[in-house]
């Protein structure tokens, strides 16, 4: 799955590139982007969307036959790295709440509202 664009209601981000992918505008651009770029999937990459916006996305997706996906971040202990057997839950997986921290860089991860995937 390759992201085509980001949509974010923060106008300061419009036109920016995140990991090489352009922020094309706010959620109000979803109809235009979906129609003009052959979008088939929408990835919701934040837990911060208000319930009414989430409902609108579900309705838009259903009306336009788009698959709605939600990003879920997990941290997994790599076995054999010398730090014990994991996090105590038995399976080595742990969900991150909020924006989390990137385990490799220790930089705070930045939340993004919506990734639009054309595939």
Image: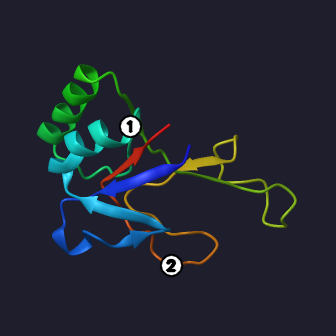
Residue 59 to residue 14: above or below: above
- Residue nearest the observer in this picture, 113 or 88: 113
Query: In the structure shown, which secondary structural element does the residue marked by tag 1 occupy?
Result: loop
The x and y percentages for residue 75 are: 61, 54
Residue 64 to residue 32: above or below: above
Task: Name the residue furthest right.
Answer: 80
The x and y percentages for residue 35 are: 27, 36
Asked whether, in this view, residue 40 is left or right of residue 15, the answer is: right
Label ID, residue 110 = none
Q: Quadrant of residue 90?
A: top right
Callout in the foreground (2, 1): 1
- Which of disc 1 and disc 2 is earlier in sequence? 1
- Residue nearest the observer in this picture, 90 or 29: 29
Residue 33 to residue 22: above or below: above
Which residue is identified by label 1?
39
Asked whether, in this view, residue 115 is left or right of residue 88, the answer is: left
Residue 71 to residue 105: above or below: above
The x and y percentages for residue 36 are: 30, 41
The x and y percentages for residue 66 are: 35, 27
Asked whether, in this view, residue 107 is left or right of residue 89, the answer is: left
Which residue is identified by label 2?
107
Q: How many marks?
A: 2
């Amino acid at each position: 799955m390759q992201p085509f664009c980001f949509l974010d209601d923060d106008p300061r981000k419009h036109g920016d590139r995140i990991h090489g992918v352009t922020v094309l505008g706010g959620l109000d651009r979803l109809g235009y982007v979906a129609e003009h770029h052959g979008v088939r999937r929408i990835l919701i990459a934040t837990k911060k969307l208000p319930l009414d916006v989430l409902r609108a996305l579900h309705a838009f997706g259903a009306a336009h036959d788009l698959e709605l996906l939600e990003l879920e971040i997990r941290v997994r202990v790599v076995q054999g790295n010398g730090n014990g057997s994991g996090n105590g839950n038995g399976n080595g997986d742990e969900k991150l709440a909020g924006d989390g921290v990137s385990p490799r860089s220790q930089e705070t991860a930045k939340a993004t509202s919506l990734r639009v995937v054309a595939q």
